[in-house]
């Protein structure tokens, strides 16, 4: 368990995956709000549809790893644009 701002709050990566295969985590601090999801490894995403979705996001910053039908990819979006990197391995998206 990680202590954050004096409160005990487990990290999403430490929580067990529910039967739905989707786990949502939210956080806020220093004027920012963040939301994230974990997906079980049996959830396979369409790489082409992901890219179409990710380039349309209106966010300050986005980092993600997805298991797709084309392999495992990491994404990073900044004001400069979206980057994609192929990865060797991951436990979940």
Image: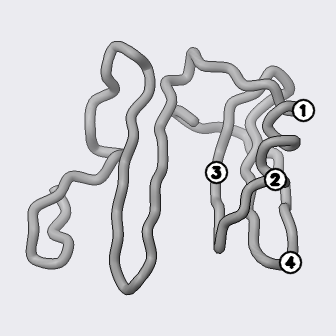
Q: Residue at x 57, y 15 (%)?
A: 42
Q: CA distance from mark 4 to mark 1?
A: 21 Å
In the rendered structure, find residue 64 and report the number of the disc placed on it. Answer: 3
Q: How is the image coloured?
A: one colour
Residue underneath mark 2: 56
Of the image marks 4 and 1, the number of the one nearer the N terminus: 1
Q: CA distance from mark 2 to mark 4?
A: 14 Å
In the rendered structure, find residue 66 and report the number of the disc placed on it. Answer: none
The local secondary structure at tag 1 comes to: helix
Q: Position of residue 90 (x, y in %)?
A: 59, 38
Closer to the camera in the image, 21 or 72: 21
Of the image marks 3 and 2, the number of the one nearer the N terminus: 2
Q: Residue at x 75, y 73 (%)?
A: 78
The label nearer to you, 3 versus 2, is 2
Of the image marks 2 and 4, the number of the one nearer the N terminus: 2
The local secondary structure at tag 2 comes to: loop
Q: Is residue 3 left or right of residue 55?
A: left
Residue underneath mark 1: 48
Residues packed near mark 4 inside 10 Å, few (<14), some (14 to 19) or many (20 plus):
few
Residue underneath mark 4: 80
Q: Is residue 69 left or right of residue 23?
A: right
Q: Are marks 2 and 4 in contact (CB under 8 Å)?
A: no
Outermost residue, bottom direction? 30
């Amino acid at each position: 368990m990680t202590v954050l701002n004096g409160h005990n709050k487990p990290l999403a990566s430490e929580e067990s995956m529910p039967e739905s295969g989707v786990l949502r985590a939210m956080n806020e601090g220093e004027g920012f709000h963040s939301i994230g999801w974990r997906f079980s490894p049996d959830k396979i995403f369409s790489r082409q549809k992901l890219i179409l979705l990710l380039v349309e996001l209106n966010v300050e910053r986005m980092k993600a790893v997805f298991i797709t039908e084309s392999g495992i990819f990491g994404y990073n979006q900044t004001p400069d644009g979206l980057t994609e990197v192929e990865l060797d391995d991951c436990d979940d998206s």
